[in-house]
Amino acid sequence: MFGSLRLRMALSHAGVLLILLASVGISGYFVLSHNLDRSSTRSIEATAAAEADRLAEEGAISAPPDSDTPSAAATRIAVYSPTGAIAGEAADVPAWLYPRSQHVTTIVVGRERVRIVTEVARATTGPIATVVAAKSLAPQEDLLSDLRWLLVWGGLTAAALSFAAGWLLAGAAVKPIRNAYGAQERFAADASHELRTPLAFLRAGAEVTSEHDAALGDQMLKEIDYLSSLTSRLLALARARSGRSDVVLEPVHVRELVTEAVQRAERNDSARISIEPNTDPVAMADPILLEAALDAVLENVSEHGGGDASLALLSEDGHVAIAVSDRGPGLSRELRARALEPFFRADPARSRSRGGAGLGLALAASLVHEQGGSLDLAESEGGGLRVSITLQAARTQA
């Protein structure tokens, strides 16, 4: 339980950091991408506008001069006459560098994206030339690709370091809780064990008393039986929750074991429980623990379920289910979520003579969990409580 809690804390620590990094990184990436794209367009527009201004001042068409500026060297420029002829050497102008109808457009040349700007050079007499400027977007795309890898690997590395830090911090945080939980379990186990001998002595004395005063003796025996039951359940619950119970899983014929548990409930608690259907699934279970879990569930029927219930045996998808549906008042969804807590009572004001100690379902859930199964609570068809015990089916059931 504590290992799972520590893992969840560490994962949540790393997950929160990863979400934050992803949010900031993705937002920054798109802002940078947009700014780089806009900057490239403005640079090409400036180059084309400068060339158009030069031609307008000269008032004649001429080939663009070679630029000695490193930032401008990557920008290709071509000048076209109003008739579409290329100014200068046509061989120096690539086939894709020609005027477009759009002022700014992007094409793909040799797997590279190229941004093209078309600008018209105008003199006082009207248009004298068309300037076409183009620049490859590969450098900025390479930069963005490197940034993506940095964000991915940097984020994963940060998440891994955060997980390690969270694991250490969670371990330090869980340690006092583990110690307190262990002390509680040891106290429950030791107290219940030490109480067995004096309770046995008190019972012997109560039996002698009942020979002389039947009413007082019966009352004393009821109180002692209650304390003995509470002691046994505390010991079983402490062992199950601490993982110290000796669990041996073996193929168990569930119907035979269920029949015996029902007979005990009918004999000791005057319960009325029907078993259906007439099947005999085989589950992997510890017979003693499963029997104790069933006793706790059926006792809950007697105390809170009106003493009347139906028990169904189901076998499907590699699992065996034992479903007990009573006809009592049931529990709300909120109370069902807490009903498996030790000492939980739906009505805290109820006396123990009517409400029990609140250990039945908690003990049953712990014992079933020790066998690798699960215990779930739901509303029955009649509005009562449905308790379902699910175990792995034995291989002979396949």
Image (tube, rainbow, N blue to C red):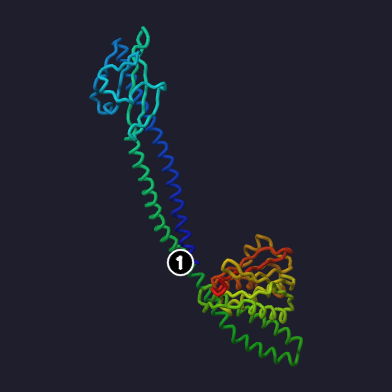
Task: Please give the name of the residue rendered at 44% of the width and 50% of the height, measured from the top-left corner.
Answer: 17
Task: Please give the name of the residue rendered at 43% of the width and 54% of the height, measured from the top-left corner.
Answer: 14
- Give the amino acid at mark 1: Lys
**On screen, residue 255 above or below 337:** below
Q: In the rendered image, is residue 33 in sight?
A: yes
For the image shown, how many numbered marks are present on the structure?
1
- Please state the horizontal and vertical placement of residue 8, each as a whole percent of the image: 48, 59
- Please state the horizontal and vertical placement of residue 203, each as a whole percent of the image: 66, 88
User: Which of the two residues, 363 or 207, is positioned nearer the viewer here?
Assistant: 363
**On screen, residue 24 above or below 37:** below
Q: Residues within 10 Å of mark 1 (few under 14, many from 20)?
A: few
- Please state the horizontal and vertical placement of residue 309, each as a whole percent of the image: 72, 71
**On screen, residue 167 above or below 247:** above
User: Which of the two residues, 196 or 322, is positioned nearer the viewer here?
Assistant: 322
Q: In the rendered image, is residue 235 in sight?
A: no
**On screen, residue 69 above or below 139:** above
User: Which of the two residues, 129 or 243, is positioned nearer the viewer here?
Assistant: 129
| Residue 25, picture quadrant | top left
Q: In this view, does 252 lie to the left or right of 85?
A: right
| Residue 302, picture quadrant | bottom right
Q: Mark 1 points at which residue?
A: 175
Image quadrant holding the C terminus, namely bottom right
SS category of the residue bearing label 1? helix
- Please state the horizontal and vertical placement of residue 392, each as a whole percent of the image: 56, 71
